Image: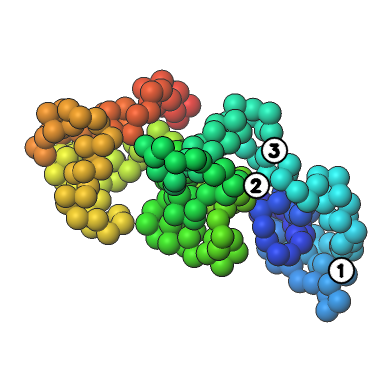
């Protein structure tokens, strides 16, 4: 991306139609500066020994917004399957279930489906959709929504929040392996569960040992205490498959090693 320059329209709301870019140089763009009126941009390359003068046309962004739409559709195009896909249906189902859940799952009173969910339900909705924010992320998310949507969150807002806050790239199997190789004392990339707990407490989000063990218990199921002991050695494959639930870890690792 070092070769790309572009423009975007404020405020930043995650709408892809409000940003555009182009490859400006054959190599890295080492510096750039705009004119005082913002109508021109000068860029300097590195290894290509070139300087370019660009004319900025804000009308192009407006045309992009008109073509892409300034409603929900641009955000739907960013989720798996698009507006008619299974994932969109899953989001909608979780959204309506959250409305019922917020009114009590076992109540006999008449339900009121008003098209919004309480802000307190949003973190659980994010987790249900496969995005697991930290407690710090959750505080930022709730603070943002309390200012912009104090009365509750509707479905379009939920989709925008999900698209804007989810990580661009998820954790890969190669990331798990490299992490274990970095923190493990053995050359095989293995460490004891007790050492893993300690690393998570020292380097990760602030959590007590009991909270970490409880998380592991939920991840491995009701037999977690029998399946994993503190003295047990665990490697990246076991961690990915037994703890995180990655099903294709071995295949992906083999592919990575073949490529390397």
Q: Which of the pair 73/40 is nearer the observer?
A: 73
Q: Residue furthest left?
A: 231
- Discs 2/3, front: 2
Q: Which residue is mark 1?
A: 40
- In the rendered image, residue 221, in percent from the top left (x then y), is placed at 24, 30
Residue 73 lies in quadrant: top right
Q: Residue furthest bottom?
A: 36
The structure residue drawn at horizontal position 38% and vertical position 28%, both measured from the top left corner, is 246
Spatial CA distance of label 1 from label 3 is 32 Å
Spatial CA distance of label 2 from label 3 is 13 Å
The structure residue drawn at horizontal position 75% and vertical position 59%, both measured from the top left corner, is 8
- Give SS at disc 3: loop
- In the rendered image, residue 153, in percent from the top left (x then y), is placed at 57, 53
- Along the polypeptide, which appears first: circle 2 or circle 3? 3
Q: Which of the pair 16/184 is nearer the observer?
A: 16
Report whether 49 appears left or right of 231: right
- In the rendered image, residue 50, in percent from the top left (x then y), is placed at 80, 60
Residue 132 in the image: above or below residue 106: below
Report whether 3 appears left or right of 57: left
- The answer to whether residue 168 is visible is no
Q: Which residue is mark 3?
A: 77
- Give SS at disc 1: strand
- Give SS at disc 2: helix
């Amino acid at each position: 991306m070092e070769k790309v320059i572009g423009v975007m329209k404020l405020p930043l709301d995650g709408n892809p139609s409000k940003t555009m870019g182009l490859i400006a140089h054959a190599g890295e763009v080492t510096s750039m500066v705009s004119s005082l009126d913002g109508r021109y941009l000068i860029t300097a390359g590195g290894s290509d020994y070139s300087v370019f003068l660009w004319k900025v046309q804000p009308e192009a962004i407006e045309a992009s917004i008109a073509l892409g739409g300034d409603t929900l559709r641009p955000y739907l195009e960013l989720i798996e399957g698009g507006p008619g896909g299974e994932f969109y249906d899953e989001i909608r189902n979780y959204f309506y279930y959250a409305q019922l859940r917020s009114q009590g799952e076992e109540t006999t009173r008449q339900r009121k489906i008003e098209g919004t969910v309480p802000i307190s339900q949003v973190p659980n909705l994010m987790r249900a959709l496969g995005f697991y924010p930290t407690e710090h992320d959750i505080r930022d998310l709730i603070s943002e929504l309390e200012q912009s949507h104090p009365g509750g969150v509707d479905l379009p807002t939920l989709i925008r929040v999900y698209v804007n806050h989810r990580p661009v790239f998820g954790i890969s199997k190669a990331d798990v392996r490299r992490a274990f190789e970095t923190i493990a004392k053995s050359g095989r990339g293995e460490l004891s569960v007790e050492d893993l707990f300690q690393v998570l407490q020292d380097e990760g989000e602030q959590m007590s040992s009991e909270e970490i063990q409880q998380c592991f218990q939920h991840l491995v199921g009701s037999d977690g205490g029998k399946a994993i002991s503190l003295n047990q050695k665990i490697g990246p494959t076991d961690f990915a498959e037994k703890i995180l639930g990655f099903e294709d870890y071995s295949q992906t690792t083999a592919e990575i090693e073949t490529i390397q």
